[in-house]
Image (cartoon, helix red, strand yellow):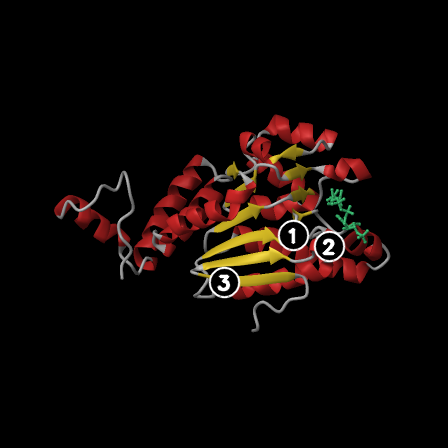
Amino acid sequence: MALGTYETILVEKENGITWLKFNRPEKRNCMSPQLCYDMVDALTELATDDETQILVLTGEGEAFTAGMDLRLFFRDLDDKPVERARARAADRSWNWYQLSKFPKPTIAMVNGYCFGGGFIPLCACDFAIADEDATFGLSEVNWGILPGGLVSKVVTMTMNYRKSMYYAMTGDPFDGKTAEEIGLVTYSVPGDKLREETIKLAENLMKKAPAVLQMTKETIRNCATMSVDESYEYIMAKQEQLRWRDTENTRERGMQDFLDDKKYRPGLTAVERAK
Ligand code: COA
């Protein structure tokens, strides 16, 4: 499939990092039905693409995304139930299920405006790094709808509960620094350092074995909604699964390098990847 030839998104690959970009800058990257269809296709391909070790989701121009496209996703589909059902299915598929279950680490690099429906892919990513001057907002209340799709759910799963209620009910915008303080993003940085800091995090992650990272993210995500007993059983089973999924034998090599060869300290750094 010809990656990078989509109507509404861009796919760029460099040194193990795949930059998946909303590409409707003149519309502040708001999400149309076509953008959802493009994302479904791209994420399906990238999930098994060997060149993609880390996925970074970001936006072209001055916005991350201004949320759902109020014209193309809402008003134009009000009287078209079939098209609306198709668009909703694609929206739901890419922005939560495909992204939150993506088998490799995902980073949302928030370069500007992030409103409404944009919170779903933001929260679906494993990490989020924001320009400290980016503008976030749960603006739905300003035009008479609820934080829909999964927005109401994912914000309370991700950020401080009191602040979720505050920003959902006031619609007040807030900046990247505030997003960090309330737990919505992992950290915020000055705009001119955004790409550099994102690459730094990606390179740090690429030093670790992919299977170990995948199982770790699945375990953290899934245990969040399990009981303690279920979590215990799940983690044990997952640990067993990792022994045969990790073809780099990180566990055995790590123990040997630490216990026998005294080559490194696992408390402070990762064992070298297998060649
Ligand atoms: N849906 C549809 N169109 C949108 C849009 C959205 N969510 N966000 C921006 N656009 C369009 C504008 O209508 C405008 O289109 P035009 O050039 O045909 O007039 C274009 O994108 C540029 O937007 P504009 O408002 O002129 O840019 P700005 O830089 O002055 O402001 C925002 C940017 C993001 C603050 C402003 O566009 C906005 O408030 N958008 C809505 C955000 C929102 O509430 N999203 C929640 C949806 S769930």
Determine which quarter of the picture holds residue 94: bottom right
Residue closer to the observer: 166 or 80: 166
Ligand 1 lies under 8 Å from the Cβ of mark 2: yes
Q: Which residue is mark 2?
A: 26
Disc 3 crowd rating (10 Å Cα; few below 14, some 14-19, many 20+) is some
Q: Are marks 2 and 3 in contact (CB under 8 Å)?
A: no
Alpha carbon distance from label 1 to label 3: 18 Å
In the figure, is residue 14 to the left or right of 265?
A: right
Disc 1 crowd rating (10 Å Cα; few below 14, some 14-19, many 20+) is some
In the figure, is residue 259 to the left or right of 73?
A: left
Q: Amino acid at mark 3?
A: Lys
Q: Give residue 205's position: percent from left, percent from top.
A: 39, 50
Alpha carbon distance from label 2 to label 3: 23 Å
Residue placed at 13% from the left, 48% from the top? Answer: 261
Alpha carbon distance from label 1 to label 2: 8 Å
* Secondary structure of the residue carrying numbered label 3: strand
* Secondary structure of the residue carrying numbered label 2: helix
Mark 1 vs 3, N-terminal side: 3
Up/down of 202 relative to 267, above or below: below
Residue placed at 69% from the left, 42% from the top? Answer: 115
Up/down of 118 relative to 1, above or below: above
In the figure, is residue 109 to the left or right of 173?
A: left
* Secondary structure of the residue carrying numbered label 1: loop
Q: Amino acid at mark 2?
A: Glu
Q: Are marks 1 and 2 in contact (CB under 8 Å)?
A: yes
In the figure, is residue 263 to the left or right of 110?
A: left
